[in-house]
Amino acid sequence: MKKLFGVTVAMTTPFDVNDNVDVNALAALTEMLISKGVSCLYPCGTTGEMLRLSVEERKTVAETVINTAKGRLPVFIHVGAMTLKETIALARHAASAGADGVGVVTPQFFSASDRELENFFVTVANSLPADYPVYLYNIPQCAANNLKPEVVARIQQQCKNVIGIKYSFADNNTTLGYLAVTDNFSVLHGYDKFFLGYLDAGCDGTVSGCACVFPEPFVNMYRAYINHDLKAAKHWQSVCVKFSDTLKSGSNMAIFKAALKMRGLHESHMRLPQLDLLAEEYRALEFVLKELCESTGVSFTA
């Protein structure tokens, strides 16, 4: 089964001025990321504003990325939704559309017990072919539910197609617990500032929203790491931190979309209630990013 690794990009979802998914902009973004050498693509996640999309829009996003990528790199679609029925429908659609696998976030908003979380993920995984890769997705600070390592282990024991987890909270003990689920359980982290450290700990890579905007420092860091050039890896890790700080680590997707426009990608808008940056905010971000690019040797334009 294919798995996520390296610089896996959590993709933004472009919206046009009429609040429709801009498939041309999405295709252009996909091509840009592939040209920069990223490892895998991961649309329809948190960075992709998944809960602001309808089921049909999410299918459109998935199909656009899959059809544009054309097998040049792994594409895993995030399919977690507010209901089990929608989650399964999106997962089956991703499989039929040609995605290499899916990611599934924990149920959101309402508290779920360990038993309920286990049952939810087992049900989703069992709705797919036994050899179709599934990643769990734990982001407790947003979803209000937390997947403990022992719960993940129970899920994996029942569903061999659950091959890994994306973890987006900076908790080292939990990360190590996930790494111990099985000898080859795949763990990817979403904390950009410790990308290098988590690789050293045994993680397979990062799932990064910041890398959707400026993939270059992340790709350079990962390449240096796998080539055993620790000095270069440390340098590029420090650059990753600077870009993550400037982009506010994905706390406001309007920053991502504005920065992509600055780099020469299609103009893209936020979906209400989130708003685009104000003109003065845009100018301030542009000034800081130009200075950062000049000081780090990263091209300002894509």
Image (tube, rainbow, N blue to C red):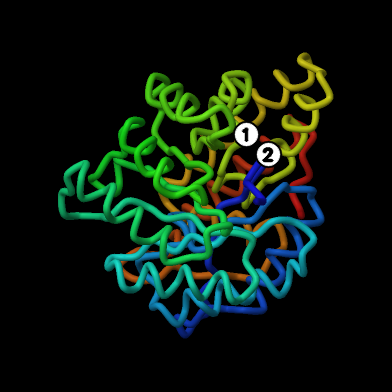
In the visual, does 50 lie left or right of 283? left
Asked whether 264 or 80 is in front, the reply is: 80
Residue 97 in the image: x percent, y percent? 61, 76
Q: Is residue 45 above or below residue 149?
A: below
- The one of 101 and 50 positioned closer to us in this rendering: 101
Tell me if residue 79 comes above or below residue 141 in the rendering.
Answer: below
Q: Does residue 23 appear in the picture of this structure? A: yes
* Callout 1 touching callout 2 (CB < 8 Å): yes
Identified by mark 2, the residue type is Gly
Q: Which mark is residue 48?
A: none
- Amino acid beneath label 1: Asp
What secondary structure is found at the residue carrying circle 2? strand
Circle nearer the N terminus (1, 2) = 2
Residue at screen point 36% across, 31% down: 149
Question: Residue 131 lies in what quarter of the image?
Answer: bottom right
| Image coords of residue 43 (percent x, y) | 55, 61
Of the 4 image quadrants, the one containing the C terminus is bottom right
Which of labels 1 and 2 is toward the front? 1
View extreme (top): residue: 231
| Position of residue 300 in the picture relative to residue 136 (left or right) | right
* Residue drawn 41% across the image and 24% down it: 177
Crowding at mark 2 (Cα within 10 Å: few <14, some 14-19, many 20+): many
Q: Residue at x 64, y 61 (%)?
A: 100
Q: Is residue 146 left or right of residue 248?
A: left
Mark 1: few/some/many CA within 10 Å (<14, 14-19, 20+): many
List x then y, in percent, for residue 53.
40, 73
Q: Which residue is mark 2?
A: 6
What percent of the width, then of the height, locates residue 28? 72, 69
Label 1 to label 2: alpha-carbon separation: 6 Å
Question: Dot 1 lies on which element?
Answer: loop
Q: Which residue is mark 1?
A: 204
